[in-house]
Amino acid sequence: MPDQISGQLQAALVALVPTGCAAVAMPVGESDALPRLSAEEDALTALWAPHRRNEFAAGRACARRALGGVGAEHACLPADEDGVPVWPVGYLGSISHSRGLAMAVAVSAGLYSLVGLDVEKTNRLGEGAMSRIVHPLEAALAGSDQVRTSILFSLKEAFYKAQFPRWRTTGNFQDLALEVDMDAGTAQILEMDARFAAELRQLRFAFRCVDDYVVSLCWR
Ligand SMILES: CC(C)(COP(=O)(O)OP(=O)(O)OC[C@H]1O[C@@H](n2cnc3c(N)ncnc32)[C@H](O)[C@@H]1OP(=O)(O)O)[C@@H](O)C(=O)NCCC(=O)NCCS
């Protein structure tokens, strides 16, 4: 990823996060320049493909810096059996990576109770994937537009990552319909399947597009 795009994505991320939330992004490095992993993280990823290990390490480095930004120095962020990062008691956060860039947000659990972060390319979805992502209530907004559908996809991934650590609810993209304000870079829930916890209706959503990427955040 060109440095200029990486810098713009980092700026977009920082502009997205609400007061009190720390956000950090960094390029995914090569194996010989990996950010340090804790012994537990090292063991978890020892057999992973180099590319996957690199993005894990960059995501963990972002998460540690973000935690430092909200007053929680923390050396180790293991993953649970579902791959969800285990944040230190009293804090929560979210990690995402895409095509050479990793990012993370962290916040005190006293300020916010849910947070989900996602970064995606906006030029990769095929027609089949687009039809699985778009809810009938979103059809007028999305049409057959790849960028708008990618924004919906990213917002729904952020939603999923915000709710999963607490409720472990699985579903599909048609379980959620969003109303998106393309100019403001915000969204709200129009319809949500009853399998998801009712308090998720209070989630706030924001996104920013940079070049052919979108960064999305949802929080409460
Ligand atoms: C889990 C999932 C959201 C990851 O998204 P992704 O775009 O593939 O990957 P990202 O880079 O954005 O995020 C990966 C990071 O999220 C975190 N993560 C993994 N699983 C997670 C989960 N279930 N919940 C929250 N965070 C999770 C991890 O930190 C992971 O990175 P790491 O393994 O290097 O630590 C995705 O694989 C998934 O399962 N999506 C289903 C969405 C869905 O069904 N939505 C329907 C309801 S609207």
Image (cartoon, rainbow, N blue to C red):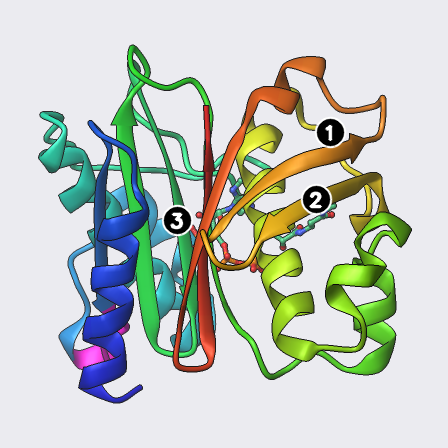
Q: Which mark is residue 95?
A: 3
Residue 100: image location, x then y, percent:
35, 77
| Quarter of the image where the N terminus is located | bottom left
Q: Which residue is mark 1?
A: 169
* Residue 14 shown left or right of residue 187 in the figure: left
Q: Is residue 2 above or below residue 44?
A: below
**Number of residues whose C-alpha sits closer than 10 Å to that of mark 3, classed few (under 14), some (14–19) or many (20 or more):** many
Residue furthest to the front in view is 183
Instruction: For mark 1, give the secondary structure.
Output: loop
**Residue type pointed to by label 2:** Leu
Residue 194: image location, x then y, percent:
85, 22
| In-front residue for pair 170/196 | 196
Asked whether mark 2 lies closer than 8 Å to ligand 1, one says no
Contact between labelled residues 2 and 3, with CB atoms less than 8 Å apart? no
Which comes sooner in the sequence, label 2 or label 1? 1
| In-front residue for pair 31/137 | 137
| Quarter of the image where the C terminus is located | top left
Which comes sooner in the sequence, label 3 or label 2? 3
Q: Is residue 89 above or below residue 192?
A: above
Q: Alpha-carbon distance for marks 1 and 3? A: 19 Å
Magenta region, residue range: 27-32
Q: Select label 2 or label 1 by which is in front.
A: 2
**Residue type pointed to by label 1:** Thr
Residue 216: image location, x then y, percent:
46, 52
